[in-house]
Image (tube, helix red, strand yellow):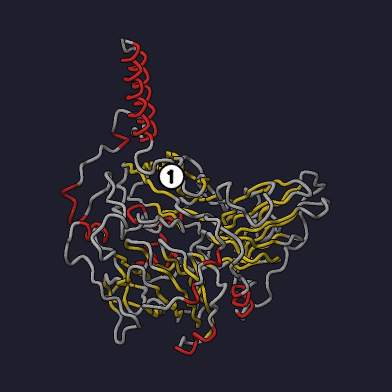
Amino acid sequence: MVERRSVMALALALLAAALVAPCFAGDPYAYFDWDVSFITAAPLGVKQQVIAINGQFPGPIVNVTTNWNVVVNVLNDLDEPLLLTWNGIQHRKNSWQDGVQGTNCPIPSGWNWTYQFQVKDQIGSFFYFPSINFQRAAGGYGGFTVNNRDVIAVPFDKPDGDITLFIGDWYNKDYKDLRKALDNGKQLGMPDGVLMNGKGPYRYNKTLVPDGIDYETVHVHPGKTYRFRVHNVGISTSLNFRIQNHNMLLVETEGSYTVQQNYTNLDIHVGQSYSFLVTMDQNASSDYYMVASARFVNESRWARVTGVAILHYSNSKGKASGPLPDPPNDVYDKTFSMNQARSIRWNLSAGAARPNPQGSFRYGSINVSQVFVLRNKPPVVIRGTHRATLNGISYTAPATPLRLADEYKLKGVYTLDFPTRPLKGAPKVGRSLINGTYRGFMEIIFQNNDTKVQTYHVDGYAFFVVGMDYGEWTEESRGTYNKGDGVARCSTQVFPGAWTAILVSLDNVGIWNVRAQNLDTWYLGQETYIRVINPEDTNKTELPVPDNALYCGLLQKYQNEQTPHHKATSSAPLTHQVYRVLVLMVLMVAAATLP
């Protein structure tokens, strides 16, 4: 009888283990339950509706380690569909979890959906945000930190603390009113301010900043060194970040360790993320300003569009006072900013997610197999609608996600004929994709013929920023490329009247979004997708469609209805984590009561 009990207990234990780790055995799991809902807040002193996660604005920080599995159960408590995307997380072989309309059906209001993916061979500072319906303008964003495994050396001493800062322009208008304005062909105009961690500016100026605004305070200790992860989560404004009287040692950007160099200020464009080491080496006669101010604008008109937080030493003897630290003095000359961007280089000797040096991948010696010049222009009217374009095409999302259409072999959802050069003739609306060659090496030149800085992002990949300059890109421009230590990242700025060139190795199967990070032009259609398919019919290069996939559009018939949570008898759905705990409890009880 004892032997039978032992055998049954062992079988139950094995079953329990299988339930807990069904996909990526051996790697830890991190579980998160998020309720995405509206709350009322007044970041700039005006009450408005913002998007919070579990009541927090900004949302919680996902803090995991390389190769961990992340499971995020999202409950959509908004009054419209929702998708969350993971800015810079590469989702190796798994575009099903990307959280954009090309790969996922939106989560209906009142429903929940669980993302599950592995941060495979990746480290760095990233963030997540809502990807549809202009919702990022109302919040819903948060940090995503991927740490090195203990066995991998980090190219600097362990900091005494880790601090995340979200900076971004902000409007007091509701995000639905902002997108309606764009639909009607209007510009958004000047933002009402800049938030830092969801809060308004410290009252450094009684004329510009009204009384009663809640501001961010970062608490530090003298002599200590802290890692600051700074993300521009705004709508369309490039920001210059600086800390009064402190040097910022740049060490990482979007998954790559950089050559370490000090900056007194750095331009951080929409959608970009940077890590700095900052040593508290000043005296504590007073607190210090942390500033994020708008770039390339008329300083006198935009003075109120400035985010100000406080750096507070534990032994500080007084409040911060006096003028803010000066921004770069180049309002009408962007050469300083471009040279600053060029100065950011890849640390070739450092390892990252793996022990081999970053420079062991010699991208400059790989032959380019495909070349695309992607040109944007100011928004235009196409068939009576205000639209933004790439190569003369304004993307409009189909009702059926592209990747699902491929899975079910649906025809007519998209075309695979995105032009390698800008189209001649009138702009048009379309669903044209880039046909990427699996394991090919693609060169993309972003040509910005608009009047403001644009930031471009490629999902699923880190790409090498190899060149940028003013004027029109030509074949001869390749002579200026950095073929050795151009930094690998996922978002790059393109200055007005200028170009930026990137190189990307297409080793990640799936359909991946290429978009403007500037929320207004992205919303108006300035995006496309790269389709990367393994021509060999094998399951080894991509994970299968998830069991919990949502279906919409032409595939709506496959979707089982879900009872909206607010109409159900329980206050929240049963998540994977809770389910597994309950199953384990049942198994333990069963094992204990065996005869």
Q: Does the image show residue 324?
A: yes
Compared to residue 93, the image places residue 440 above or below, namely below
- Give the residue drawn at x 34%, y 34%: 18
Between 380 and 545, the one lying in front of the other is 545
Q: Does the image show residue 174?
A: no
Residue type (three-letter) at the residue carrying disc 1: Val
**Mark 1 residue crowding within 10 angstroms, few (<14) / some (14–19) / many (20+):** many
- Give the residue drawn at x 75%, y 46%: 221
Compared to residue 242, the image places residue 376 above or below, namely below
Expressed as whole percent of the image width and height from the top left, the position of residue 255 reads: 53, 59
- Give the residue drawn at x 63%, y 73%: 343
- Give the residue drawn at x 40%, y 52%: 84
Image position of 280 (left or right of 45): right
Expressed as whole percent of the image width and height from the top left, the position of residue 531 reads: 31, 66
Image position of 436 (left or right of 250): left
Compared to residue 383, the image places residue 113 above or below, namely above
